[in-house]
Image: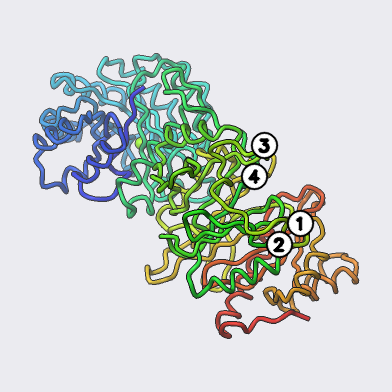
Amino acid sequence: MRRGIATVCLSGTLEEKLAAAAHAGFDGVELFEPDLIGSRLSPREIRLRAAELDLAIDLYQPFRDFEGVQPGRLEGNLRRAEAKFEVMQELGATLMLVCSNVSSDAIDDDALAAEQLHALAGRAAEHGIRIAYEALAWGRHVNEYDHSWRIVRQADHPALGVCLDSFHILSRGTGLDAIDEIPADKLFFLQLADAPHLVMDVLQWSRHYRCFPGQGGFDLAGFTSRVLSAGYAGPLSLEVFNDVFRQADPTRMAVDAKRSLLILEEAMQAPSARRLPPPPDLHGYAFLELAVEPTSVGQTQRLLNAMGLTPAAQHRTKPVTLWRQRDVRVLLNAAAPTPPGVAAIAVESSDPARSSERAEGLLAPVLARQRGPGEADLSAIAAPDGTSVFFCRTDVDERVSAGHWLEDFEALAPGGGPFTGLDRIDHIALAQPFDYFDEAVLFYRSVLGLEPLESLELSAPSGLVRSRAVTNQSGSLRLALNVPLLAHDTAQPAGLQHVAFECADILAVGEQLRARGLVPLAIPENYYEDLAARSDLDPGLLSAMRELGVLYDTDHAGGEFLHLYTQTIGDRLFFELVERRGGYGGYGAANAPVRMAAQRAVAEAGVGAGALSG
Ligand code: MG
Ligand code: MG
């Protein structure tokens, strides 16, 4: 199956777009006319450039407002088309997209449209060119694909067929049954785009919010399967208009786009698709690596210590200490070549080799590791946000097989501190770079085989934050990905990250933390007044929560979530403790605005101003 991408998806000059598409391994491009018009290259030079890059020009697009016009205007429109046919011949392109007329004086007459498209196809055929007719969702009279097909059928010219565009069809909720009625040799082209479910003008929705398959809310796999089973044999071509993608690095976006097609093909179980290794079962976090600045090492150690983790082992060759409470493992790296915060997450995989094969198949950058003699060879990849992701298997056997990552560490002391009740790493929240949020969500879910939850908008003192969680079925692996809704200027520091630990009894753990001198994030009294008013929580429980800075949330199924936050280390990282009751599956998003306001208050008041509330 050939894969293509429209030049309009990417930022940059036409040369940069072509280079990015070729680098990502696409077979062809749709040449968006404004990209040609704005290019310094002549059509002939563009043809040569594309050929050098081994890229076909699959489609020339778009040609507008052609059909359903007053007969007196037809000749002018045909002349306009002839000029484009000549350009296409120079380009070596043989398929032109004609989208349905949007002009207010278009005539609602299928026979007239068919007759005029027939005339156009006749002229095109003289140049060896074919016409793909596409119903725009906002076309004046033709805005459904089955309508465009009826007109094409009526026109009955071998050089005229339809172009199906998933956005135009799925955004209107048009039934898909008529796809089967279109003969395979009339399915000239297929354009794929996903989009989030939004209630807004369809033109604005299309021009600004399209995204790559798997990044929005449409069933692209179901739709594309229908088109393929109807006999479509052309390329799977992405046509995405997106404000953020068009300002992002084109090379990265093209790789993201290619990844989206690989996942789509996997979801469709397309026979021609290269088989990706299926995602192995993941069982939570093996460890987490925190990069700490020298000035923050003491504060981080005090926090970990207060939460009950103890330094258990030292890396044999690196300034990395393993802090641990039972199976909760945190590596503190005082010399990581990364910004402070979560430098790496290591997931427990039932088959680490297959996990990394899958990641490579999905175009994840594989990290070269500096490995000392005798050190475990961990497979690691780089996520779009710069976090390293390791795949490992700690639970095989305590007899420690060769290649076991814990072998790299020398035990500092037997035993460890008293058990304070931390059961596991519950979730990790990672701030994402503004331009690459959709890429990051798709990356984590596809590489790790996770499911995304609904995208949320949270209100912070500095603006709105978009948040999307991805999780595996058992809930043992949860990530929350956050990004500002609107771009900040680049001088803004990267957003906060946090690591949440789960415990069985947060009040007991909260008491222990207090006894160990941990000062949680101060939650305003107003929060508890409101909580008392809107819930029927036991007054004793409420006052204990107030005492310990514990927040509360419930879900529709009666699940409950109790959680508290630590102070922030160096403007970047904090910890959370959570207790899940009754199968609560969320993250306490309702409390995030309170948390962010409280953190802002602490930051404004200066370091160390936090105190126990109540
Ligand atoms: Mg289209
Ligand atoms: Mg959280």
* Mark 4 beta carbon near ligand 2 (under 8 Å): no
N-terminal label among 4 and 3 = 4
Please name the residue that numbered disc 3 is placed on: 397
Can residue 79 be seen here? The reply is no
Can residue 452 be seen here? The reply is yes
Q: Are marks 2 and 4 in contact (CB under 8 Å)?
A: no
Looking at the rendered structure, the kind of residue marked 1 is Cys
Please name the residue that numbered disc 4 is placed on: 284
- Check disc 3: other Cα within 10 Å, few if <14, some if 14-19, many if 20+: few
Q: CA distance from mark 3 to mark 2?
A: 29 Å
Looking at the rendered structure, the kind of residue marked 2 is Leu
Tell me: 535 left or right of 521. right
Which corner quadrant holds the N terminus?
A: top left
N-terminal label among 3 and 2 = 3
In the foreground, 99 or 426:
426
Image position, residue 42 (x, y; %): 9, 40
**Tag in front: 3 or 2:** 3
In the picture, the disc for residue 503 is 1
N-terminal label among 1 and 4 = 4
Image position, residue 273 (x, y; %): 42, 22
Disc 1 secondary structure class: strand
Q: CA distance from mark 3 to mark 1?
A: 25 Å
N-terminal label among 1 and 2 = 1
**Tag in front: 3 or 1:** 3
Please name the residue that numbered disc 2 is placed on: 577
Tell me: 503 left or right of 259. right
Q: Are marks 1 and 2 in contact (CB under 8 Å)?
A: yes
Tell me: 477 left or right of 149. right
* Mark 3 beta carbon near ligand 2 (under 8 Å): no
Disc 4 secondary structure class: strand
Q: CA distance from mark 4 to mark 3?
A: 17 Å
**Tag in front: 4 or 3:** 3
